[in-house]
Image (cartoon, rainbow, N blue to C red):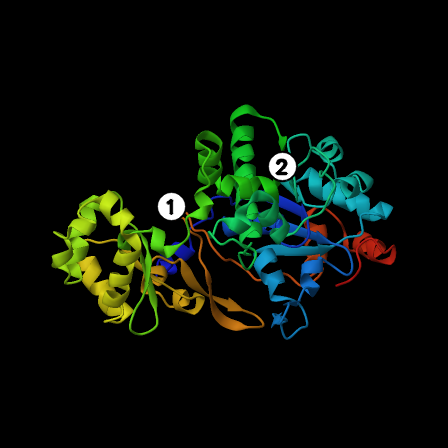
Amino acid sequence: MRENEATMDLPGPLEGIKVVEYGVFHAGPGATAILGDLGAEVIKIEASPGDPVRHWTSIGAVTFALGNGESFMNEISNRNKKGISLNIKEEKGRRAFERLVSQADVFLTNLRKSTKDRMRLDYRSIAEINPRIIYAGVSGYGPEGALADVGAFDPLGLARSGMMFITGSDQPRLLHLGVLDQATAIAASHAIITALFTRERRGYGQEVHVSLYSTAIWLIYADLMMNNALSIDPTTSGERNKHSPLRNVFLCRDGKWLIGTHHPESKYWPSLCRATGRTDLIADPRFADDQARQANCRELVAIFDQVFAARTRDEWMEVLISHGLMYSPVQTIPEVQSDPQALVNGYITPFDHPLLGRFMVPGYPIHFSRNRAGHRGSAPDLGQHTHEILREIGYTDEEIEELEQAGAAPSA
């Protein structure tokens, strides 16, 4: 695996950066979890009963509650963080919050616009406390317009952006689970890191804003560009019988699928025929060039359906790769967990969890030659680090006790 004892001692790229988060669910908190992957110190503020993601334990028939009654989604959204329980509606709690923010590099929230204004969590209020801070806002549909104060979840961003039709089906299809939430978290972390770099170069803090809707539109960049510039809809081309065997999926003898993608197809057509033992098709006038193969695509796909059904997926993969062809197994989620290619690169890596024990988690997708990035710690219990954080920002034990008695920093 990529991570070993030597790399464990390397610093994170964002070591020394302090992040304060007042967020819920994943699209916002997922961004600060990524900053934690990169070595930033992330402090999550929660008021009782905590981030709702702690209590979101099922979707339909799928249940993901842990032994402590909380949601596994909380682990995904809040890994690598310290947790402080703070009631910022109470005066003493607000003062503690402001002291924390005054010492931070980044503040993130994904509360609705009206809620941020009411709680004085908007950019203007936070910048008055710390003018150099990078303020990250995450929303459903963006900071302007009629939907600026309307909440949203992952499927709603998928729906409004057109992403639910990119599979080529005539019915909308969801991408499960939290794909757009995670992409939005990635976009938000990208924005924060860019703003931090700008602050280092030019000396000023600023607000950055990312939404589910903006991220979804960004993800289907090519589809929208083609539609806008050429008036075509590339999302309607999902039928197998409209694609040559060089860009298609096939079911093998063992019930497993593989997929190929080759450009330009004319370059690879003879190699595919040789690899599959169908050299007779090279000279067949029905399939002589790209245009002929497209015109007779249905017939050609039917031929290769029979060809690929003759061997297992692994057998075919060995043959196809040896002929310089670009095919891949269409893997299930469990197969990815044990994929040697994922393991050797650290894309899937073991993590020791205090409740669940050792299991495999996604690794950080980027290699650094002089830094370490990736899963560093489990999600905190509600308010787990309250006393530790308050002491770090200068509170004495007596002052912490006063905060608790005032209901500003409830005991964990």
Q: Quadrant of the N terminus?
A: bottom left
SS at mark 1 in the image: loop
Q: In the rendering, at what x and y percent does residue 237 appear?
A: 41, 48
What's the CA distance linking mark 1 and mark 2? Answer: 30 Å
* Sequence-first tag of 1 and 2: 2
Visible residue check, residue 344: no
Q: Are marks 1 and 2 in contact (CB under 8 Å)?
A: no
Using the rendered view, name the quadrant where residue 321 is placed: bottom left
Q: In the rendering, at what x and y percent does residue 116 appear?
A: 76, 41
State the mark number for residue 54: none
Residue annotated with mark 1: 370
SS at mark 2 in the image: strand
Q: In the rendering, at what x and y percent does residue 137 appear?
A: 65, 40
Is residue 200 shown above or below 156? above
Residue at x-position 56% and y-position 38%: 192
Is residue 46 shown above or below 101? below
Using the rendered view, name the quadrant where residue 344 is placed: bottom left
Residue at x-position 12% and y-position 51%: 283
Q: Quadrant of the C terminus?
A: bottom right
Is residue 380 shown above or below 90? below
Residue at x-position 28% and y-position 62%: 302
Visible residue check, residue 107: yes
Crowding at dot 1, Cα within 10 Å, few <14 / some 14-19 / many 20+, comes out as few
Residue annotated with mark 2: 209
For residue 325, side relative to residue 387 (left or right):
left
Q: Nearer the viewer, residue 291 or 375?
A: 291
Q: In the rendering, at what x and y percent does residue 247 appear?
A: 31, 52
Task: Tell me which amino acid carries mark 2.
Answer: His
Q: Nearer the viewer, residue 137 or 87?
A: 137
